């Protein structure tokens, strides 16, 4: 599961709307834009940290001469060491960050709901927006099915085709 930069504005807007419509929070009309920007900043920071962890993982693979398929394990370990959620843990991590934001930002007047109620509202939206990752992966794999997975040619072509697909869907 992954947060795509191109999806962040829609995610932020949908999360804020659902929290207001579900009467989880109260926001003055003039502060709606600020709260949406706050949510956007949480999501953008998540993307930044995830990229940093990925870069560090790639560096470790290169330094240790490991095969590329070890990247996720290394990323998972780096994320756990820093208290960051990736993969299946990303939804819980992001929902916790958004809840903390709502509790501490001066732009939200009142938080009416318990954390678990807010989490129930946020999780499905995050999951839906972030599930695009597996759909993109399937599409890319279908396009390069003539190459053997795990080879350097496959890795290069996967990355190239993924960028093309993301660009076509305006996710980058």
Image (cartoon, rainbow, N blue to C red):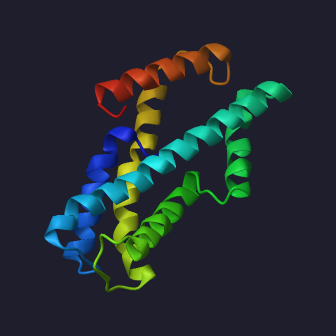
In the image, residue 170 above or below residue 8: above
Q: Residue at x 29, y 31 (%)?
A: 170
Q: Residue at x 41, y 35 (%)?
A: 136
In the picture, which quadrant includes the C terminus? top left
Q: Position of residue 50 (x, y in %)?
A: 56, 44
In the image, residue 172 above or below residue 96: above
Q: In front: 71, or 95? A: 95
Name of the residue lying farthest toward the right: 64
Left or right: residue 14 versus residue 64 is: left
Q: Position of residue 110 (x, y in %)?
A: 30, 82
Left or right: residue 38 versus residue 83 is: left
Dividing the picture into quarters, in which one does residue 85 lie?
Answer: bottom right
Q: Position of residue 90 (x, y in %)?
A: 53, 57
- Residue 1 in view here: no
Dividing the picture into quarters, in which one does residue 82 lie?
Answer: bottom right
Q: In front: 138, or 167? A: 167
Dividing the picture into quarters, in which one does residue 154 lie?
Answer: top right
- Residue 31 in view here: yes
Q: Position of residue 56 (x, y in %)?
A: 69, 36
């Amino acid at each position: 599961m992954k947060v795509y930069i191109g999806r962040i504005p829609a995610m932020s807007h949908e999360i804020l709307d659902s929290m207001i419509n579900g009467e989880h929070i109260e926001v003055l009309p003039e502060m709606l834009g600020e709260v949406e920007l706050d949510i956007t900043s949480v999501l953008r920071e998540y993307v930044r940290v995830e990229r940093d962890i990925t870069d560090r993982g790639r560096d470790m693979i290169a330094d240790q001469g490991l095969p590329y398929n070890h990247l996720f394990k290394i990323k998972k370990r780096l994320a756990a060491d820093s208290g960051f959620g990736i993969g299946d843990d990303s939804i819980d991590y992001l929902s916790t960050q958004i809840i903390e934001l709502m509790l501490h930002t001066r732009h939200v007047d009142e938080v009416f709901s318990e954390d678990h109620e807010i989490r129930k509202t946020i999780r499905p939206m995050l999951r839906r927006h972030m599930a695009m990752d597996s759909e993109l992966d399937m599409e890319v794999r279908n396009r390069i099915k003539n190459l053997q997975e795990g080879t350097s040619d496959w890795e290069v072509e996967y990355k190239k085709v993924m960028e093309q697909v993301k660009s076509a869907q305006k996710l980058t």
